[in-house]
Amino acid sequence: MLGVCYYPEHWPEVWWPDDARRMREMGISFVRIGEFAWSRYEPRRGQYEWEWLDRAIDVLGKAGLKVVLGTPTATPPKWLLDEYPEIAPVDAHGNIRGFGSRRHYTFSSEIYRDESCRIVEIMALRYGQNPAIVGWQTDNEYGCHDTVLSWGREDLKAFQAWLRRNYQTTDQLNEAWGNVFWSMEVQDFEQISLPNLAVTEANPAARLDFWRFQSSQVASYNKLQCDIIRKHSPGRWITHNFMGFFNEFDHWPVGEQIDIASWDSYPTGFVERFPFSEEERNRWAETSHPDIAPFHHDLYRGVGRGRFWVMEQQPGPVNWAPWNPVPKPGMIRLWTWEALAHGAEVVSYFRWRQATSAQEQMHSGLNLPGLSELSVGGQEATRTGKELQEIGSLPDTEQAPVAIVYDYEAYWMTRIQPHAADFRYEELVFHFYESARRLGLDVDLVPPGASLEGYKLVLVPSLPHVSEKALKAFENAKGFVLYGPRSGSRTRNGATPEGLAPGPLRELAGLRITQVSSLRPGLSDPVKGKASGLGIRWREYAETGATVLAKFANGDPALTAKNKHHYLACLPDEKLLGNVMAHICRQAGLKTTKLPPHIRLRRRGKYIFAFNYGDKPWKASNLGKVILGSNLVAPQAVAIWRASSKTDK
Ligand code: GAL
C-alpha cells in the first residue's frame, strides 16, 4: 500500500539498484517515474533516447517494484517552445508565460495537442506491455500554477469555435448572455473577445462560459492521452494526480475518464493557502488542520468512483508555501494511516530523495539531500510499512451516512459574482465538512445529480445552479437535505431564475428569497431558535410557508424546514453551523459523537481509526478490540480498533 515518486534521471545510474532494494526493504511496492523527463526522452526533435528509461524500468521491475509511468507533457522541452512559441499560455493581463519552469502550455493549442499525442503514443507503444508497468499517470497536476485559464490567441480561436458549436447562432448567444445590456451584442462569432481586459467587469455569463470552455479543454486533452494509452497498454490502469483546494476545472468528468483518481497531499502547505485566521494557522502549522487531508481523500474517492491513491504524500517540509515548517514527529505516519483509513489504495511519497539542485532543493524527501540515508519522514514511512505488513489487508470502504454535494461551477459562479468579498465557496464547503466530522461522522463527496440513495443526510453548502438532474436527485432523496445560501439562485447561464431563488428548489424547500445582503467583517445578524449563533458575511431575506426553525433578530426566517428539506439563509459562524448540524443530525437519527477539535474518527468496514492532531492524549472508550496503538491515543498518534459489533460502527 506504499509507493514513492522517483527520478532516476536525477541520480547516477549506479545508484538505481541500491535505491530499488532500499525501497522494497521499507515496504514500498509502487514507484512513479518519468513525468517530467521529456528533455531526456527527446533532446532534439525526433532524436529519441529511451535506453536509459528501459534500464531504469528494468532495474525497478527486477527489484519487485510496480512502475507507474507518467507522460511528460507537463514539461515540454525548450526546442518545442522555440519551434512553436504559440504553445505558451498567456495570463489574464495578456503576458506570455514562458519557458523556464513547467506547465508552459495552453490546453487550446492544437499543435501542443498533436505533440502530446505523438510523445504519449511513442511511450505507450514502447512500454505499454512492459510487465513492470502497472499503470499510467497522465501529465502532472492539470492547472497547477494557475494554468487552466489561458488568455491568448489560441484560446480565443478555440473559444469562438466552442461557442459556435454550443449556441449555433449569435442570436442565441446574445440572448443567453443577456448581451442587450450595455450594447454587448455581436453579429458574428468572430467578434467575440475573451472576457479579460475590459474596462470594467466583463459579462459574467461570458466569464462563466469561458471557464466552462477551459474546463472542457482540460477534459478533452486528458481524454486524448487516455485513448492512446488504452489502445497500446491493455490491462493497465490510468490515473491523474489532482491537487488540493483546486477548483479551476471540473474534476468530475475527468474522473470518469480515468480508472483511479489520485491526488497530491501537502497538508502543511495547504494550511498556508486556506483562508484560516492567523490564530488557526499557527495552531495547525506543524500538523495541518485535521480536516484538510481527509476532505480531499473523501473528495477524490468520489472523483475516482470509489478508487483513489495519494500519489504524492508530503514526507517532511515542503518548499512552496510562504512558511514551510518541519511537521511534528509522527505526522508522516499519521497522514499515511489517515489516507488509508479514508480508503486510499496506495500512499506514495513525494519524493524518494531530496534534490540538491534547482527549484525544489528545499523540499524534503524520504532520503536526505543527495544521500542514501533516511530522513525523519523516511523513518516514519518505514515504521508504517512494518505496521502495514503486520496488520495485513484492510476491510473495504463503505458508503458514508452523510453526503456533501460538491460542485465546481458553484465555485466559478460565486467567484465571478461574489457580491461579498469574503463569500468563498471552498471555505463554506470545508466548514460544512468539518462540522459533520466534528460529530464523528464519515462523509462522502458527490457531484450534483448523483444518486443520494442510502444517505441519511445530504449537505448542499451552496448550489447556485440546480440542474434538472440535480433537482431529480434531491426529489428522490430519502434522507434529510440541508441547502445553504445562494442555492438555486442562478440559471445555467448565470441569470436570475424566474420566480426568484431558490429557483427549481422553491417547491421542495418551500421558500422564496427576495433580497440578499452582504455583511462587512464585524457586522453579523444573531440567529435564535432550534439552532443559535450568528449569520456572518451573507444574509438572505426569505418569505416562507415552511416551518421556521430559527430566526434572525428581526424575526425573519434563518433556518426553515419543509418535510426533510432544510434551507439555511445565511453564512453561519462556527457556532451556528455546529448547532444546525447537531439539530439536523438528531432529526435524521444519526448517531454522533462530539469530538474535541483535534480528534477525528474514520471507519473502513469494521475498522475504526482515530487520529490525534493535538498536543494532549485522547482517551477513547469502547470502540472495540485494539488493532494498533491503544485506547489512550497520544499526540500525533493513530489508533485502530475492530468494532466488536455492528452497533459500534
Ligand atoms: C506537486 C508536484 C510535484 C512537486 C510537489 C512539491 O505539486 O506535482 O512535482 O512539485 O508539488 O510539493
Image (cartoon, rainbow, N blue to C red):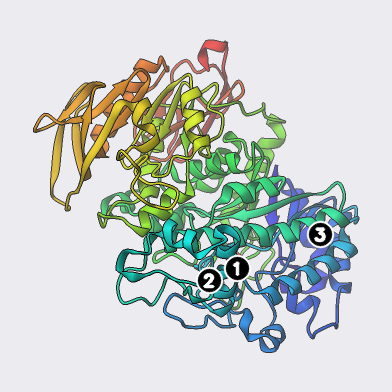
Q: Which residue is mark 1?
A: 161
Q: Residue at x 61, y 61 (%)?
A: 165
Classify residue 67 as left or right of residue 183.
right
Name the residue located 66 percent from the left edge and 54 percent from the top edge. Answer: 240
> Where's residue 177, x and y in %?
41, 59
Number of other residues with Cα within 10 Å of mark 3, as a class: few under 14, some 14 to 19, many 20 or more: some
Residue occupied by mark 3: 228
Name the residue carrying label 2: 189
Placement of 599 over or under 161, stated as above or below: above
Q: Nearer the viewer, residue 404 or 439?
A: 404
> Does mark 2 have its CB less than 8 Å from ligand 1?
no
Mark 2 or 1, nearer chain start? 1
Look at the numbered discs 1 and 3 and tell me whether their residues touch, using CB distance below 8 Å. Answer: no
Marks 2 & 1, CB-CB < 8 Å contact? yes
Quick one: 163 or 372, which is closer to the camera? 163
Q: CA distance from mark 1 to mark 3?
A: 25 Å
Q: Secondary structure at mark 1?
A: helix
Q: Quadrant of the N terminus?
A: top right
The location of residue 340, given as percent across then percent down, is: 61, 38
Res. 631 in view:
no
Quarter assignment of residue 531: top left
Residue type marked 1: Ala
**Above or below for 454 versus 280:** above
Q: Are marks 3 and 2 in contact (CB under 8 Å)?
A: no
Name the residue: 70% across, 49% down. Answer: 258
Residue type at tag 3: Ile
Q: CA distance from mark 3 to mark 2?
A: 33 Å
Q: Provide residue 500's location: percent of width, then percent of height.
A: 30, 40
Q: Which numbered disc, 2 or 1, marks the residue closer to the eye?
A: 2
